[in-house]
Image (cartoon, coloured by chain):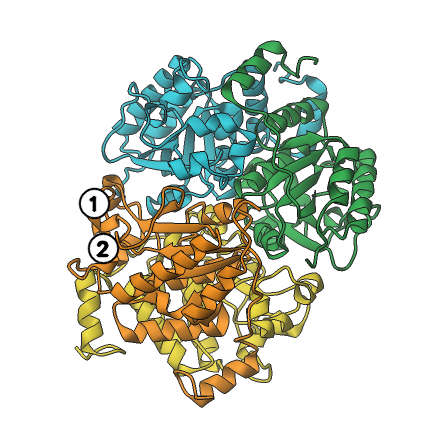
Chain colours: A orange, B yellow, C cyan, D green
Amino acid sequence: MTDGLYGRGTDDTYAQAGFGARVRRGERPAIVVVDLTNGFTDPAYPTGADLSEVVSATATLIGHGRAARVPVVFTTIAYTPAEADGDAITWLHKAPGMRAMREGSRAVEIDGRLPRRAEDILVVKKGASAFFGTNLAAILTGLRRDTVLICGATTSGCVRATVVDAVQHGFSVLVPRQCVGDRAPGPHEAALFDIQAKYGDVIDLAEAAGHLAQGAPIDV
Amino acid sequence: MTDGLYGRGTDDTYAQAGFGARVRRGERPAIVVVDLTNGFTDPAYPTGADLSEVVSATATLIGHGRAARVPVVFTTIAYTPAEADGDAITWLHKAPGMRAMREGSRAVEIDGRLPRRAEDILVVKKGASAFFGTNLAAILTGLRRDTVLICGATTSGCVRATVVDAVQHGFSVLVPRQCVGDRAPGPHEAALFDIQAKYGDVIDLAEAAGHLAQGAPIDV
Amino acid sequence: MTDGLYGRGTDDTYAQAGFGARVRRGERPAIVVVDLTNGFTDPAYPTGADLSEVVSATATLIGHGRAARVPVVFTTIAYTPAEADGDAITWLHKAPGMRAMREGSRAVEIDGRLPRRAEDILVVKKGASAFFGTNLAAILTGLRRDTVLICGATTSGCVRATVVDAVQHGFSVLVPRQCVGDRAPGPHEAALFDIQAKYGDVIDLAEAAGHLAQGAPIDV
Amino acid sequence: MTDGLYGRGTDDTYAQAGFGARVRRGERPAIVVVDLTNGFTDPAYPTGADLSEVVSATATLIGHGRAARVPVVFTTIAYTPAEADGDAITWLHKAPGMRAMREGSRAVEIDGRLPRRAEDILVVKKGASAFFGTNLAAILTGLRRDTVLICGATTSGCVRATVVDAVQHGFSVLVPRQCVGDRAPGPHEAALFDIQAKYGDVIDLAEAAGHLAQGAPIDV
């Protein structure tokens, strides 16, 4: 096996500390698609990048999920004018670029290349994690899910924060490598390293598709 | 100014996206010391590393906090036998090394080199973030705090998760660079980069001390 | 002093147990208006009742808040079609009448008799408490608030759940008696008794107005 | 059918509003025992009452749970000296009697008449709801539970707050009537009315036992 991102020394340190085990693969998966909105997937936006391959891989994963009747939840960052223009959201003081994610604008709409359906729940979020300040955990519990496959953008930002919260909430976490993307390769790779070490299994899209095929249908 | 960790291209991308602004410096700070327990600061433990310099810098910061009557909150990861030996905590499937953090053991005690006082609140946590599944946010609100200075270990793990949650909860976040540490330099640097870009201000210990000197006393 | 709702015996029991003390009156109040939407204030809806007096008293309180530059947050229960028609929200299995609270309908709009302004934040909630699954606590912290005056409907349902969560989150709670209402008098009175005993101070509208006059302006 | 606590008019109003439906009975139950500690069950404490019958009924329910290998979670309110003697917990300003619930004291120990086992998780809480500021929801998710049977004290206080949070978190809620108790009958009855109307099914102990017999074992 080749050394990880930071070399053999770090790998040994982490192995000794007891990280990187395989997560329990549950029986009732859900797909959570984090912030694949135009504001993130269209490079014409200052906050965007060309994430065409991520969108395509996520569409493929969703296709496998549909066949297995696995629920799909989308998230979007969207602020009302009162939020975007005011002082109430502390995060926007540090990340003012996010103020452009305005409710009702094209920037906050789910990328049209994704096969979204009317029955897919859309979670509107105000921070990095899709769980924070939302009812996502309650929705997954209401749908009787035990495992989440997390896709989306950005790997080092909202995806990573969502992954950490997902395992903290008690869900097993799988991250299909091809289904997450970032603006820059450095933070992307660093985030995948940390996720695989401590929070969820970073797996191949084919493995994720295989897992979905075993998932219980939504209404069981 | 020199380029950041990932070079000029990433810096430009982040500047364009609108990240890295200066946080509001509030008037009512608190110090949160994340997991500076023996299990993390004593290299004799498999989960530990030599964090003597981090402990020392944090002790210095706390000293400045005492002079300004700023509240200090410590956190520790500690599991009951039922938690450590059972299946209920999903994180422990991925990070089984954490099962060694047993309630009542020396591993979960705050490092004795830190100037802890009886009136400092100790938050017992079960996950990465000091806010998740704890009443830390409620405590900070009850103490009428608006800003948190976050110290501790590990930078890429529990510190980072705590930073992300702190800003999501509405607090301004300051991270004194000398007061956080990790097992390995790679994840440490990557985490500081992401924190400075998106969640809080990574500052020098001297600047943090200066900020504390302006803080409101705990009982105002 | 006259006996409370349940008579002298219960009053004595609660006094002995150490309930009913006066809350800390903070310096930075916010007004939270819970679910004064047409679906609750217009008796033409099956879920509604004639809450004209509650709406009028709340409008008066908001007027005092404007004069003191106190922030006002409104909440509404609103479900997307995927939520209203699906299984994901467990509460809707017990309270199916709430499925009528559909995003975009008149039922979920704030009652037009209330003096809502563009800068007032609107929190969309999916459960009983205005804090659950929302960023309300983060917003109040971001606005540097320490005390909440809670108005709205229904006293025994969403108001009470919001009150309990507010004090748990660390905020002092004041409930102006004239500003909360319910479909039926029994649950209304029982809720006010429990709130006054355990969670917040049930006060007169005039006292609430006086408190607001002392509040810090929003931008301090 | 006889009229409810508040008479026919209230019953009709609630039926019209669409409350009181039967909850989904899940397949994977857990028992949550709220605050049956000596401080609440021993009338020698100012905060206590004689809850012998509630303790006995809960012990019976737990017995049925053991036979079906259903997990049991206990909760206790317990404050460290820093919490009990300080200002950080806002609830303690309103309910100062709760300051007597000190970590390490007999008051916060689970009533010895209950058949607690080493593998039962104990959740330490600081507020009314067993979910607030704790990892209870994460534990239930980690144990793959979809339904909670909630027992304990007091009905109008911590039980009710826990019930409201349980359904908000996505769990189906069952409250065995004989397994919950309060200091005074008025608030007890009012709470059961509200719970049955809006949050969970108030059922007989025998029905609860029957439900447990169908539950999936903990390790499935």
Look at the image and tell me whether residue A65 can be seen: yes
Q: Is residue B135 above or below residue D61?
A: below
Look at the image and tell me whether residue B216 can be seen: no
The Cα–Cα distance between marks 1 and 2, rounded to whole angstroms, is 9 Å
Mark 1 residue type: Ser
Is there a contact, CB below 8 Å, between mark 1 and mark 2? yes
Q: Is residue C112 left or right of residue D63?
A: left
Q: Nearer the viewer, residue A72 or C197?
A: A72
Report in which chain the residue with disc 1 lies: A
The numbered mark at residue C160 is none
Quadrant in the rendering for residue D200: top right
Q: Is residue C8 above or below residue C213?
A: above
For the C terminus of chain C, the image quarter is top left
State the SS at label 2: helix
Q: Position of residue B141 (x, y in %)?
A: 44, 47
**Residue drawn at 48 percent across, 44 percent down:** C169
The numbered mark at residue A105 is 1
**Residue drawn at 46 percent across, 66 percent down:** A208
